[in-house]
Image (cartoon, rainbow, N blue to C red):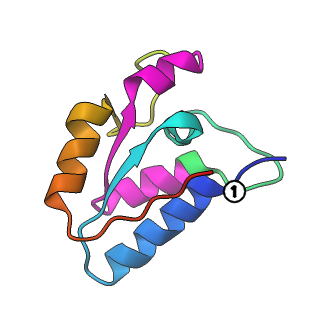
Amino acid sequence: MMAMDANVAVKLARAALAKGYKVDMFGYGEGVTAVKKGQNPKRFPNVGNELEETMKQGVSTAICETCYAARGFERGEEIPGAKVGSLTNDLFKFVSESDRLITIAR
């Protein structure tokens, strides 16, 4: 069974953008797979394409480098504009600068 957490996160980001909010997204754990370029799903949404389009609308996106490497990804495999970063720098910055936080986790 495939989790749809990243798809839900992208939809929430788009809804927030439509209401005029500044949106930053940080992926960790399995969430890092959302930024993998070249996704080609057959029976579910292409979250990579959806995220890339959402980023073009102004969403800042960073992912955990440790989580990314742990899943066998290497730098350069991410969609354009996605930052391979860290919990201690990027997530901390996103949280400290925000006035609202939504976490999607299992």
User: Which residue was labeled with disc 1?
Assistant: 45
Tag 1, which secondary structure?
loop
Residue found at x 59% / y 33%: 38
How many numbered marks appear?
A: 1
| Depicted 9 relative to depicted 1: above or below | below
Residue found at x 27% / y 60%: 58
Left or right, 6 with respect to 82, comes to: right
Left or right, 25 with respect to 69, comes to: left
Residue found at x 41% / y 65%: 102
| Depicted 45 relative to depicted 11: above or below | above
The residue nearer to you, when weighing 102 against 35, is 102
**x, y percentage for residue 3?**
72, 50
Residue 18 belongs to the span the image colors magenta: no
| Depicted 101 relative to depicted 6: above or below | below
**Residue 77 visible to an observer of this rendering:** no
**Mark 1 Cα shell of 10 Å, populated few (<14), some (14-19), many (≥20):** few
Residue found at x 44% / y 57%: 53
**x, y percentage for residue 67?**
49, 26
Quadrant of residue 20 within the rendered picture: bottom left
**x, y percentage for residue 24?**
30, 56
Q: Amino acid at mark 1?
A: Pro
**Bounds of the magenta span?**
49-72
**x, y percentage for residue 98?**
20, 63
Quadrant of residue 75 within the rendered picture: top left
